Image (tube, rainbow, N blue to C red):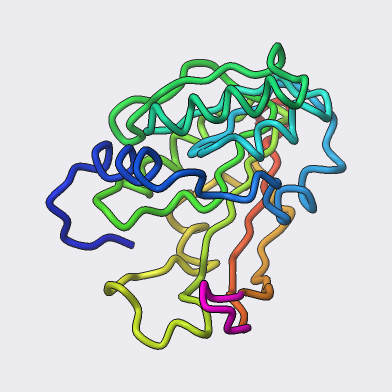
Amino acid sequence: MTETHPLTAAEFWEARYRDGGRLWSGRPNKLLVREASDLTPGSALDLGCGEGADAVWLASRGWRVTGVDISRTALERAAGHAVEAGVGERAVWERHVLGETFPEGSFDLVNAQFLQSPVEFDQRSVLRQAAQAVAPGGTLLIVMHAGWPSWQSEPPFEAQFPTLDSVLDELALPETDWTVETVEAVRSVSVSPEGVEGFRDDNVWRARRAHASRT
């Protein structure tokens, strides 16, 4: 999902957060809530955390969260959101240009919500690194847009959206080490900036890593 763009990914996302004011609602993504509410809190990695809504929700449920984003402005807002929510001590924030650097350690939950970019981004490599960062017994949760909103009559650029099967193929999770628990297309209400009602399709994948490799 990329277009030709004169800015680097870091420049693009920093400018979008810095110049556009608050971008997101401050509420956690619905599919994160659906898929993670039944998980036992532990350590969590939130990739592309943006302004921190998902990380703050996880922290409020007892998770110790590492939030990662490419934009310093987004991370500053995320840290402020966590403090306002009373969970600042349960979250740390790291700046990474995913595809070039990646957080160290392993995590009981690795959350990647809409880790898609209109500028150059090695999504396949990052998702594989995300899977590698899941601790034994932990969960990998990925959610991505499956297409443009129904009201988007003229897409802003040409894009290839991942399919349910294509992401599974790219992850290549060994069946001996992983149990795929959710592979689902979900349709949600979507409203344009002008108030036109429609829908948008998203794909969700949840997989659990075995506690120990089976032989």
**Image quadrant assignment for residue 9:** top left
Task: Please state, as top left, top right, bottom left or bottom right, where the C terminus lies in the image.
Answer: top right
Residue sitting at the far bottom: 153
**Image quadrant assignment for residue 184:** bottom right
Q: Position of residue 15 (x, y in %)?
A: 30, 42
Task: Decide: is 49 above or below 154.
Answer: above
Task: Decide: is 57 above or below 164.
Answer: above
Identified at 37% across, 26% down, the residue is 96
Task: Decide: is 187 above or below 28.
Answer: below
Judged left or right of residue 86, residue 23 is left
Along the viewing direction, whichever of 116 and 104 lies nearer the viewer: 116
Residue sitting at the far left: 6
Q: Position of residue 161 (x, y in %)?
A: 41, 68
Task: Decide: is 71 above or below 82.
Answer: below
Along the viewing direction, whichever of 191 and 89 lies nearer the viewer: 191
User: Looking at the magenta stretch, what is its main secondary structure?
Assistant: loop
Task: Please state, as top left, top right, bottom left or bottom right, where the N terminus lies in the image.
Answer: bottom left
Judged left or right of residue 108, residue 106 is left
- Please say whether residue 192 is one of the residues in the magenta stretch: yes
Along the viewing direction, whichever of 183 and 1 lies nearer the viewer: 1
Identified at 70% across, 47% down, the residue is 27
Read off the magenta span.
Answer: 191-197
Judged left or right of residue 20, residue 59 is right
Identified at 53% across, 30% down, the residue is 77
Q: Position of residue 193 (x, y in %)?
A: 51, 72
- Please say whether residue 101 is one of the residues in the magenta stretch: no
Task: Give the tally of numbered discs.
Answer: 0
Q: Position of residue 88 (x, y in %)?
A: 69, 16
Identified at 32% across, 70% down, the residue is 159
